[in-house]
């Protein structure tokens, strides 16, 4: 009986009618320019309001998150503001301290610029991040609008705008939300480039991926992945000049990252594309799932530094992860982690699957109204909206959308929406991961949810007018 009901549902002419409307939207003229601008403004203001409210209620708590990492960024930024680009390329500068090599220099460069303009103000930094993250919600609207109709695009943009995950992370003194914006802009450029195979758009997309890497290195392999996908699926994607497009995209990323690689070679005398730390996150990632401690790797920075101090009889190693011999220490970590992986491939594959699955859970973050008076109507309304953003609600709705799009054979839409989530779930799952590393993934979960909300609402309105 269940099978017959399912069959009647899939054979219902209503669904093909709804999907044909998506086709007509995709092939017909775009929404009027004025209407598009109005929607962009609505999404931006909504996103800004939620993030500004988060700042208002949590501005004293946000700086307490990852204080050691945030302090390192600030130290690097002060040195950049004082010594400028000359000091950045000097071996004698305090910026040649390997402790500052644990993260790419993009965020300190931004902080140094802000400090020169407005002084050292956490509030100014937070509002720069709030504005950038609000634009990311607008970009999701534009990306979905290129693939589906304007209603779904508007829903997706508003979901990203109202997300408490983005609101909370945008006020932390960390580069995680900032790194999402150029990555989304790179995807939007790719969609534009696909229309007429404009090589400049492919190049710009590569440059934007490189800029994202300068803020967080997690997307470093995204450009090589796109390079392979364009070469393999170029004809299916209707890219007329697939080989030049793939090469120029990769070149854009290399060109934007190359100055940092050259600087590291000059200052440290070693090949370090952006930063060190892959060995650290690999070992700690193994430690996360090695509950029996069979391999002897800890799951946090402090214990890792202490372990190395004992192993190498170097008490000074316990003081920092990247201080004395930082580059060589991290490469030893990579070799140790690789030895475990090669000796236990099945176990590590299971770890990657488990960790990849956890990435589709939404981070539990403070809700705005938790810090507000319960008697205030506005925070209560915000809380009602933001309680929607939990895994038990979002993930099933996203899965329904994936199934419906597959049933309707909207393969390109599926591929575009799943590109970044699959990248993170495959690549980042090999390393220690925190929710803030994979924020870009949430935007596409919300885009799938927008598809389900649109289709289910239309079905209900037609069944029960």
Image (cartoon, helix red, strand yellow):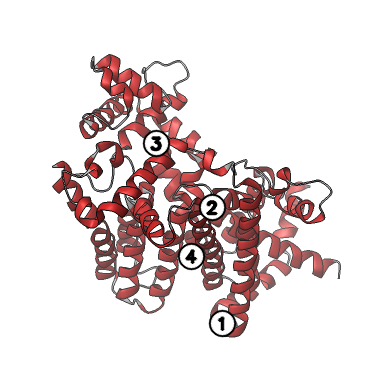
* Residue at the right extreme of this rendering: 464
SS label for mark 3? loop
User: Is residue 385 rendered to the left or right of residue 266?
Assistant: right
Above or below, comparing residue 174 to residue 240 in the picture: above
Q: Nearer the viewer, residue 369 or 193?
A: 369
Q: Quadrant of residue 358?
A: top right
Q: Position of residue 297 (x, y in %)?
A: 37, 21
What residue would you read off at disc 4?
Answer: 412
Q: Nearer the viewer, mark 2 or mark 1?
A: 2
Residue 170 is marked as: 2
Between 377 and 36, the one nearer to me in the picture: 377
2 vs 4, front mark: 2
- For mark 3, what is the residue? 431
Label 1 element class: loop
Dot 2: within a 10 Å radius of its alpha carbon, few (fewer than 14), some, or many (20 or more) residues?
many
Residue 142: percent from left, percent from top:
53, 71
Q: Earlier in the sequence, mark 1 or mark 3?
A: 1
Foreground residue among 286 and 320? 320
On the rendered structure, is 86 left or right of 152? left
Q: Is residue 404 visible?
A: no
Q: Determine whether label 3 and label 2 are within 8 Å by CB.
A: no
Mark positioned earlier in the residue sequence (2 or 4) = 2
């Amino acid at each position: 009986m269940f099978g017959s009901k399912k069959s009647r549902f899939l054979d219902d002419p209503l669904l093909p009618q709804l999907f044909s409307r998506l086709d007509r939207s995709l092939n017909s003229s775009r929404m009027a320019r004025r209407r598009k601008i109005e929607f962009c403004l609505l999404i931006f203001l909504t996103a800004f309001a939620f993030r500004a409210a988060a700042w208002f209620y949590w501005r004293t708590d946000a700086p307490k998150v990852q204080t050691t990492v945030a302090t390192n960024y600030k130290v690097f930024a002060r040195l950049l503001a004082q010594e400028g680009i000359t000091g950045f390329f000097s071996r004698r500068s305090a910026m040649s301290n390997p402790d500052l090599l644990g993260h790419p220099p993009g965020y300190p460069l931004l902080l140094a610029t802000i400090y020169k303009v407005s002084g050292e103000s956490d509030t100014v930094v937070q509002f720069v991040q709030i504005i950038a993250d609000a634009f990311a919600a607008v970009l999701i609207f534009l990306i979905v609008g290129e693939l589906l109709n304007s209603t779904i695009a508007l829903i997706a943009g508003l979901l990203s705008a109202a997300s408490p995950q983005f609101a909370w992370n945008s006020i932390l003194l960390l580069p995680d939300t900032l790194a999402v914006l150029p990555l989304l802009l790179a995807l939007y450029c790719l969609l534009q480039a696909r229309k007429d195979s404009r090589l400049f758009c492919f190049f710009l997309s590569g440059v934007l991926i490189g800029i994202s890497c300068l803020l967080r290195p997690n997307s470093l392999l995204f450009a090589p992945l796109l390079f392979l996908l364009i070469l393999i699926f170029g004809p299916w994607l209707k890219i007329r000049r697939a080989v030049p497009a793939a090469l120029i995209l990769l070149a854009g990323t290399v060109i934007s990252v190359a100055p940092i690689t050259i600087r590291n070679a000059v200052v440290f005398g070693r090949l370090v594309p952006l930063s060190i730390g892959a060995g650290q996150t690999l070992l700690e990632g193994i430690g996360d799932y090695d509950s029996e401690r069979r391999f002897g790797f800890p799951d946090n920075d402090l214990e890792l530094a202490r372990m190395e101090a004992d192993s190498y009889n170097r008490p000074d190693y316990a003081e920092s992860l990247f201080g004395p011999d930082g580059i060589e220490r991290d490469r030893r970590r990579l070799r140790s982690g690789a030895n475990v992986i090669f000796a236990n491939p099945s176990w590590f594959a299971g770890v990657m699957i488990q960790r990849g699955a956890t990435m589709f859970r939404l981070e539990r973050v403070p809700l705005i109204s938790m810090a507000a008076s319960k008697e205030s109507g506005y925070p209560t309304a915000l809380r009602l909206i933001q309680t929607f953003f939990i895994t038990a609600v979002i993930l099933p709705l996203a899965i329904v959308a994936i199934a419906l799009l597959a049933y309707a054979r909207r393969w390109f839409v599926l591929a575009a929406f799943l590109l970044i989530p699959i990248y993170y779930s495959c690549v980042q799952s090999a390393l220690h991961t925190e929710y803030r590393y994979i924020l870009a993934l949430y935007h596409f979960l919300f885009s799938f949810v927008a598809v389900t909300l649109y289709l289910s609402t239309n079905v209900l309105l037609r069944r029960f007018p």
